[in-house]
Image (tube, rainbow, N blue to C red):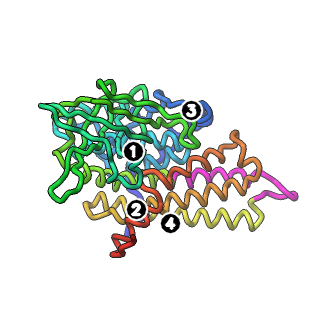
Amino acid sequence: MDMELPESHQMLRDTVREFAEREIKPVAGELDEKEEFSVELTHKMGELGLFGIFLPEEYGGQGMDYLAYVIAVEEISRVDGSQGATIAAGNSLGLGPIYYFGSEEQKRKYLPELCAGKKLFAFGLTEPNAGSDAGGTQTTAKRDGDEWVINGSKIFITNASTPITWGTVVQTVTGTRSDGKKEYTTFIVENGSPGFEARPMHKKMMWRASNTSELYFDNCRVKDSAMLGKRGEGFHQMLHTLDSGRLAIAAMGLGCAQGALDLALGYTAQRKQFGRPVNSFQAVAFRLAGVATEIEAARALLYRACWLRDSGRPFAKEAAMAKLYCSEVALRAVNAGVQAMGGYGLMKEYGMERYYRDQKLLEIGEGTSEIQRLVIARHLGCKPL
């Protein structure tokens, strides 16, 4: 078994890490403090090829695999969770559904500019009463001639109201199936469409430089051509999107954990107490050693899940495992980092408190830790209520 990364992937890691240190790190704290989405950084990440890494070159992508994408998200998140979220959502939730389920016309229209990082797309799933219960969607789309009329709302949607957002893929209820269950269909709704409004949300604890939005649909009309895939395929599209998206959230957790560990190691090597470096005390050193061990285990779990996906094998269980474990390793890493740095770990100028805040959403977004355990248990043949 060859555990070495291909040279192309190692070069990608080095390139993205150098970019993140040079371009993102100097401004991450200020953007977080101001709750400011950076169009400039998004464009630069696009120029680096971080959008559409796993898409074919014919659509403007890089023609690499999902492991390459996950490595890029990991390295960006190692420096800043907000920019990691922009990349993760821009790929998994933005251009991903269009690439996998869109018509050739839709792909040709939207993907090239999305892959270039010139524009963004969002994925409208979560609603005020439909979070973990994704089947609880209440937003409706009713047919009227050759148009569909959408009414409802979405919340906590990443990248949906930036200055460069092109639109959102929206899951709606379009009727009732023969078995009595809801029929779900997704539509592409461009920003600026009559009856559609995307409002940015503020005063977040975490990912403050990432755009989060509320969406409102008031008799919003879209053409038949705006339908993504076929009528009634929405729920399948949503599940596929979430399975792949969990790998990106896992990568954010892995990057967050690594960044927190790196910061703690650097600080404890310089900080002295009782006449010697803090990292010479067993209580600190052993705690960081435990975190480092868990990070290596998390990386192996995540990369194997990516290998399964890239090999065309089932990966839903492993994606849930990776998302669960990486997000919770990040929790232990940031907690250890704050503890090792003491009072300085709580000060914004030192950066650890931002890792501490950013980590929390990783246990919630794209399926809470409780939902991941439910998914895993079902794959194991268990039937938890």
Q: Name the residue under label 3.
A: 35
* Residue 321 x %, y %: 42, 64
Amino acid residing under circle 2: Ala
Q: How crowded is mark 4: few (under 14 residues within 10 Å), some or many (20 or more)?
A: some
- The Cα–Cα distance between marks 3 and 1, rounded to whole angstroms, is 23 Å
Q: Which of marks 4 and 3 is nearer the N terminus?
A: 3
Q: Name the residue under label 2.
A: 320
**Image quarter for residue 224?**
top left
Q: In front: mark 4 or mark 3?
A: 3
Q: Mark 4 points at which residue?
A: 297
Vertical arrangement, residue 63 with respect to residue 331, above or below: above
**Residue drawn 71% across the image and 49% down it:** 345
Q: Is mark 4 on a helix, strand or loop?
A: helix
Vertical arrangement, residue 72 with respect to residue 160, above or below: below
**Residue drawn 61% across the image and 52% down it:** 260
Q: Is mark 2 on a helix, strand or loop?
A: helix
Q: In front: mark 2 or mark 1?
A: 1
* Residue 145 x %, y %: 12, 31
Q: Mark 1 points at which residue?
A: 127
Numbered range of the magenta stretch: 255-278
**Residue drawn 55% across the image and 61% down it:** 329
**Image quarter for residue 250?**
bottom left
* Residue 251 x %, y %: 46, 53
- The Cα–Cα distance between marks 2 and 4, rounded to whole angstroms, is 15 Å
